[in-house]
Image: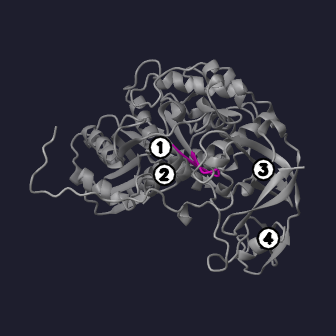
Amino acid sequence: MRKVAIIGGGATRCGKREASWRDLAQEAGKAMFENVHNLSQKDVDSLIVGAAQPERFAFQAHVAPLVAEYLGIMPRKVLARTELMCASGQAAIRYAYACVAGGLSDVAVAFGVEKMFMPDMAEAQTNMTCVLDREWDGVNALSAPPFFAMTAQRHMYEYGTTKEQMALVSVKNHRYSALNPLAQFPKEVSVDDVLKSPMIAPPLQLLDCSGITDGAAGVILVPADDAKKYTDTPMYVVGSGQANIGNAVGNLASLTEWVPLKLAAQEAFGSAHITIDDVDLAELHDCFTISEIMEYEALGWCEKGKGGKFIEEGQPYIGGKVAVNPRGGLLGCGHPLGATAILQALDILQQFRGEVPKGRRVDGAEIALAHNLSGPANVHSIMVYSR
Amino acid sequence: MTTKMSNVEFDKAKRPETIKLPYMLDFYPLEDGKNTMIGQFFVNLKQGRLTTTRCKKCDKLLWPPRIVCSNCLSNELEWVDLGTEGELYAFTEMKLGAPLGFVQDAPFCIGIVKIGGLLISTRIDNAKCDQLKIGDRLQLKIVELEDGRVFYRFKKT
């Protein structure tokens, strides 16, 4: 296996954009290529496009060649689209990483695009209801908000976690997204704002939930030995792990115990030869406030059931035990499914380069973890990056 | 203001105002033998029986019902009853964001019920969220769609 580096990337602003799927792809592609010196589109031999539901949101399949056409890329090694719902972007990074590490590709683009705003938002909600097992869970209208609402209810029931503790996750992540020009919600919120926001699926309120988001992003991966040809400040891929248990809600090990996250972390930390204490910065998948609380626990920063207390004590802030979601998270930045993991990777790269504004900068960060979950939290995917 | 080119024809194109919900945007499974090999589940449901498949070789209880055992790959499966009474494990209410096909029902309750050794998701038809609590007894009910297909739900006893 060759060591792999990410040498640059670019992204669109996220949010409710007056732009089409392909507009978003072009905007991010241009930003990505302009971020990297000594490299043009013709040098790219592989393109992996993370896209969760272009068939539903943009009525377009076969999107990898579409992106290739619009970005002027003519892949000769690998061209594919990855779908792993909320982790589709991380699947793209993982494939590109495998292609470069394995020696098949010398310049691979991991790209992600999602256009989620539609003229009729009920159509968008419908799309999101085939994410769980559609015939046995989706048929009960079980999409992400009600699923994570029940997860939150069980966590509150079993461990005494409170709505105020969950709200604190939203407060933290909005504090950082307020300093992120790419964020969908660049505005601070208070605990009171969260608790007074519209009820979506009790106990989850609007500000407990990440948004419906348009956005696109791309990063470029090369063998580490070539990285300095393009940049003085590459970021290295040093580990990864992914695990899955079951799919239908009834086959999950538990609603409050994310076993696959523990397995993915074990694999990722093992491959990176690090422990949890080595992680300076973590981009965690806070699709809902309860998710981030359960991730503190499963990753091992605190005991099972103590995630609420962990945020109450300020531990996941910059300067605390570990800086969690200094980008602003999905709660603050939005969640354009296929682009989300690419946006996380790009922000970590900018953290390592010292390019993010004071207030959300993690000074001296050496090792970062990026995490995505997908479906009913039955799949967890982790990448480990280093300066 | 744009000026129309005089030699170019301008015509109207029609789109239907309403269309029948296509099957692939219909959440309810196609249940007859032409479309699935687990049609027996729905035949049983029409008799008021909630069933699933169990592997005759390794005894594994499989949910959702299927045609091959995911544990030992045997295709010798048998139908077993899960019972008609369960216990509420978790619940919430669809307040905002209901998908097409369910919009007219909102708000409605969704839960996970413990039944026959399984945890399965369900709609709960006769209660509001604040009338439910974890551990409540639930009773099986069957809903029939206009086209004759059926699905299971639960109600609070």
Q: How far apart are the two marked residues, 3 and 1, measured between alpha carbons? A: 38 Å
Q: Chain of mark 1?
A: A
- Closer to the camera in the image, A328 or B23: B23
- The residue singled out by tag 2 in the image is A88
Residue carrying label 4: B46
x, y percentage for residue B87?
A: 87, 50
B47 sits to left or right of A373: right
Q: CA distance from mark 4 to mark 1?
A: 45 Å
Chain to which mark 4 belongs: B
Q: Which mark is residue B125?
A: 3
- Residue at mark 2 shares a chain with residue at mark 1: yes
The front one of A369 and B38 is B38
Chain of the residue displaying label 3: B
Where is the N terminus of chain B found, in terms of image quarters? Answer: top left
Three-letter amino acid code at disc 4?
Lys
- Residue A8: name its quadrant: top left
Q: Nearer the viewer, mark 3 or mark 1?
A: 3
A377 falls in the magenta region: yes
What span is in magenta?
Answer: A373-383
Mark before the other along the chain sequence, 4 or 3: 4
Above or below, comparing residue B86 to residue A236 in the picture: below
Say what secondary structure mark 2 lies in. helix
For the question of whether residue A282 can be seen, the reply is: no
Q: Residue at x 55, y 42 (%)?
A: A371
Q: Measured from the top left, where is residue A80 in percent x and y?
A: 39, 61
Reading the image, the residue beneath label 1 is A341
The amino acid pointed to by label 2 is Ser
A341 drawn magenta:
no
Location of residue A121 with respect to A134 vertically, above or below: above
Q: Secondary structure at mark 3?
A: loop
Chain of the residue under label 2: A
